[in-house]
Image (cartoon, coloured by chain):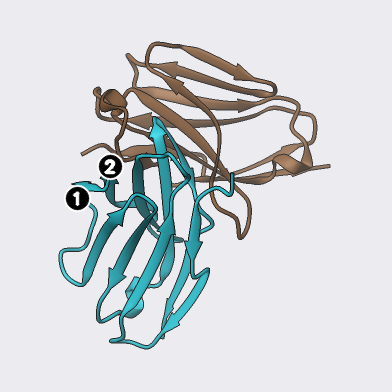
Amino acid sequence: NAGVIQTPRHKVTGKGQEATLWCEPISGHSAVFWYRQTIVQGLEFLTYFRNQAPIDDSGMPKERFSAQMPNQSHSTLKIQSTQPQDSAVYLCASSLGGEQYFGPGTRLTVL
Amino acid sequence: GEQVEQLPSILRVQEGSSASINCSYEDSASNYFPWYKQEPGENPKLIIDIRSNMERKQIQELIVLLDKKAKRFSLHITDTQPGDSAMYFCAASDASSSFSKLVFGQGTSLSVVP
């Protein structure tokens, strides 16, 4: 079991560019969660999917952020027109029910 | 929505002693309380959790206590070792539907010194 896979591990973008982050959940897990981690804000929930359907996006910034889960094997988080305040580690977690297991994260740096 | 407060933010203990981290939550609907350990540059790893139908759970040197009336839960690490040095996060969720977002505390940086 490879665990949750996230790519890329590091991404550097210029202000105003687009960033797409990928997550492959643990095989058989039916829920995928996205969180963001910064020193100041800590670990913040963004959005989650269950059986590929969006369930709760209450943590997503209303502009520029979107997430999709086109199939059971991957989810994407897209940030349009990135801003320096978007710099963070974006963590994906998958769950079969209850326990959530995190991937290694994508460190996004917006210059 | 749910808010979780975690204290202390920094904890330094002698090797072999116990370390305690305390969390409180606001939403009485929360019924699942996991603890994560995060080492520098690594992802958070689930180390122990407790559900609201329990008051105490122990896995080896880790003990979790839950007081639902006071809306508090705590992690106790007995016989600490240098390898226990890391960030620790508590979290709470309403897992009544089996799937629910986690709301995290701000974290505790634990240092175990020889």
Could you say where residue A52 lies in the image, as x and y percent from the top left? 26, 48
Which chain is displayed in cyan in the rendered image? A
Left or right of B54 in this view: A31: left
Q: Is residue A67 left or right of residue B37?
A: left
User: Looking at the image, is B87 positioned above or below residue B40?
Assistant: above
Gap between marks 2 and 1 measured at Cα: 18 Å
Residue placed under numbered mark 2 in the picture: A51
Q: Is residue A42 left or right of residue B75?
A: left
Q: Is residue B91 above or below residue A103?
A: above
Q: Are marks 2 and 1 on the same chain?
A: yes
- Say whether residue B105 is visible: no
Residue A78 in the image: state x and y as whole percent: 29, 69
- Comparing marks 2 and 1, which lies closer to the viewer? 2
Q: Amino acid at mark 2?
A: Asn
Labelled disc at residue A58? 1
Chain letter of the residue carrying label 2: A
